[in-house]
């Protein structure tokens, strides 16, 4: 039986259809937050307002990048044998914010360059006997922009 | 009203990987600091401990743990926790008590025992509301991941090279060579650094600070008390523990994203710059007057960022300052004469206090072969998780 594909964390991203991070927007000042703020707005100049869920841009420019050459400690669930992976910090133009994410497997730091366009996908974070746990990742943007 | 307090005594327990109870290290550092001040435990009216989160409950109540070990005698007690700024918050608390006239003699002490390898979130269980747990769970974002992002950014913005980063390590290793409190006392070559294993590109093992056991203590007093008990002492005219201002546009541990700058106006002074700016303003001094600095070199690349953040040079000029030898012992403004985190490794709640110990020795002219000649004004700076930063000015 095929494993169930479930998000590794609920409510942080759309995992069916086009990959989108889910932030929140303050009804008072319009500031966007990721991860969501649901109880209050952190802008000190804002009088406050209702926070509503909002999908973030799924493309942006690579602000910086690095990688993990050694397995991170728990609670990260590292594959055995461990395969190094890159981590990207991507600047979203409309939101004027930088969002971190793993880079998809097979794209190492040598293939990354600051300023390049990146797009969001969903991919496997880890698996157990029943489920495949999904997370958002970045990859260099393709002309078609199809999500994995 | 003067905002100065006197540093009457300083003491440390050597950094290392000793594997003993953190309280033992704190007691040793305290006894050294009291001896240095020519005071007894009986003279201390208040104890402020820097908290540690990796040593169970005694670490959360570090002030009381140290006081108990030294022998409970009804002293006022407090504990501060502010990640890497814990020690500076303890100093700020002690200073406030002294300036408010609540105490004349306050002991500040921080100590840690650290596990091997990467720092990992403390406590067990699934904690989906805790960003420090989540950054490991969802990203595997260790501390070196953030250091690697800053280092790569510096290369992209200013053309820093891996050789520049390696030069910082070579410098700090040379500085700490004979520091009796340093954990690593070994000369390092450019080649050693540049052939060590990559941890988080572009940073290699020798570009990243270790995690250590260690302790540091200072005895702070009012100026009046100091004048009655000593003829020569250094003072602390300013302590900064400022938060960032919203929106903070540089990604920080343990966050997944920066604040959005789409609506709120970006502050004129970025967070790292604002930490020492507040301290300079409080002390009424200019960065150009600084003779010596102890900065938080979690990575070699980050030390270069600090040169600019604390006002030693303009953004983009840090590599030149380093290459010209200005920040090396013998240069215009030596940075990390102690050897820095590069030679010590992080013992979190002790680190900001250790920076003040080093500046005290420097300003008294007691730093031996790592002495910065004629130093009269020093600055410390550090930064940790959850928007914590600190800076302490020490002057003679």
Image (cartoon, coloured by chain):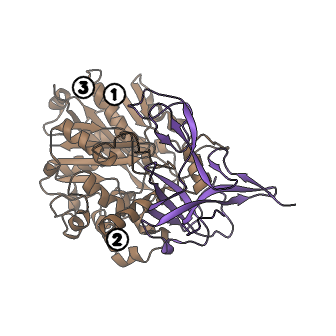
Examine the rendering and report whether any part of residue B354 can be seen.
no
Q: Which residue is mark 3?
A: B99
Disc nearer the start of the sequence (3/2): 3
- Quadrant of the rendered image containing residue B232: top left
- Quadrant of the rendered image containing residue B345: bottom left
Question: Height in image: B307 above or below B246?
Answer: below
Q: Chain of mark 1?
A: B
Q: Is residue A101 left or right of residue B274?
A: right
Q: Chain of mark 2?
A: B
Distance (Cα) linking label 3 and label 2: 43 Å
Question: Height in image: A61 above or below B192?
Answer: above
Q: Are callouts 3 and 2 both on one chain?
A: yes
- Quadrant of the rendered image containing residue B196: bottom left
Chain A painted colour: purple
Q: Position of residue B245 (x, y in %)?
A: 35, 39
For the residues labelled 3 and 2, say whether their Cβ atoms are less than 8 Å apart.
no
Disc nearer the start of the sequence (2/1): 1
Q: Which residue is mark 1?
A: B42
Q: Which residue is mark 2?
A: B166
Q: Position of residue B306 (x, y in %)?
A: 29, 55
Q: Chain of mark 3?
A: B
Chain B painted colour: brown
Q: Quadrant of the C terminus of chain B?
A: top left
| Mark 1 crowd level (few <14, some 14–19, many ≥20, 10 Å Cα) | few
In this view, which residue lies farthest toward the right? A1
The local secondary structure at tag 1 comes to helix
Disc nearer the start of the sequence (1/3): 1
Question: Height in image: A139 above or below A48?
Answer: below
Q: Nearer the viewer, mark 1 or mark 3?
A: 3
| Mark 2 crowd level (few <14, some 14–19, many ≥20, 10 Å Cα) | many
Q: Position of residue A61 (x, y in %)?
A: 45, 61
For the residues labelled 1 and 3, say whether their Cβ atoms are less than 8 Å apart.
no
């Amino acid at each position: 039986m095929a494993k169930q594909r479930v998000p590794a964390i609920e409510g942080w991203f759309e995992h069916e259809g086009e990959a989108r991070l889910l932030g929140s927007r303050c009804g008072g000042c319009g500031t966007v937050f990721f991860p969501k703020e649901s109880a209050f707005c952190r802008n000190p100049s804002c009088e406050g307002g209702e926070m509503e869920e909002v999908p973030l841009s799924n493309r942006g420019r690579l602000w910086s990048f690095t990688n993990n050459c050694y397995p991170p400690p728990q609670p990260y669930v590292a594959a055995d044998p461990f395969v190094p992976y890159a981590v990207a910090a991507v600047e979203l133009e409309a939101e004027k914010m930088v969002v971190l994410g793993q880079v998809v497997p097979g794209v190492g730091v040598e293939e990354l360059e600051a300023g390049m366009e990146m797009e969001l996908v969903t991919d496997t974070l880890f698996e157990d006997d029943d489920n495949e746990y999904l997370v958002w990742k970045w990859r260099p943007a393709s002309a078609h922009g199809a999500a994995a | 009203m003067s905002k100065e307090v006197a540093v009457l005594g300083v003491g440390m327990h050597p950094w290392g990987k000793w594997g003993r109870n953190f309280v033992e290290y704190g007691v040793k550092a305290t006894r050294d600091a009291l001896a240095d001040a020519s005071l007894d435990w009986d003279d201390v009216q208040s104890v402020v401990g820097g908290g540690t989160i990796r040593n169970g409950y005694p670490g959360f109540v570090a002030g009381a743990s140290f006081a108990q070990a030294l022998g409970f005698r009804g002293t006022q007690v407090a504990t501060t926790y502010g990640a890497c700024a814990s020690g500076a918050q303890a100093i700020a608390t002690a200073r406030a008590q002294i300036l408010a006239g609540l105490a004349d003699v306050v002991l500040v002490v921080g100590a840690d025992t650290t596990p091997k390898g990467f720092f990992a979130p403390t406590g067990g269980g699934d904690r989906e509301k805790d960003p420090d747990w989540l950054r490991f769970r969802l990203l595997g974002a260790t501390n070196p991941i953030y250091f690697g992002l800053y280092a790569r950014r510096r290369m992209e913005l200013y053309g820093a090279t891996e050789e520049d980063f390696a030069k910082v390590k070579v410098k700090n290793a040379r500085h700490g060579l004979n520091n009796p409190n340093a954990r690593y006392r070994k000369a390092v070559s450019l080649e050693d650094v540049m052939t060590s294993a990559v941890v988080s590109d572009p940073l290699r093992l020798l570009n990243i600070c270790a995690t250590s056991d260690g302790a540091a203590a200072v005895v702070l007093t009012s100026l009046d008390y100091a004048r009655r008990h000593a003829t020569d002492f250094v003072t602390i005219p300013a302590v900064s523990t400022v938060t960032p201002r919203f929106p903070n546009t540089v990604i920080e541990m343990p966050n997944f994203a920066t604040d959005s700058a789409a609506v709120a106006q970006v502050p004129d002074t970025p967070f790292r710059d604002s930490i020492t700016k507040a301290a300079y303003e409080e002390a009424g001094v200019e960065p150009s007057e600084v003779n010596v600095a102890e900065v938080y070199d979690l990575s070699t690349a980050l030390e270069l960022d600090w040169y600019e953040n604390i006002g030693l040079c303009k953004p983009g000029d840090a590599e030149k300052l380093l290459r010209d030898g200005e920040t090396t012992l013998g240069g215009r403004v030596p940075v990390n004469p102690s050897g820095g985190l590069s030679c010590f490794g992080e013992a979190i709640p002790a680190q900001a206090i250790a920076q003040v110990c080093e500046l005290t020795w420097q300003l008294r002219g007691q730093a031996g072969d790592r002495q910065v000649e004629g130093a009269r004004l020093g600055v410390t700076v550090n930064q940790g998780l959850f928007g914590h930063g600190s800076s302490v000015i020490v002057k003679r």
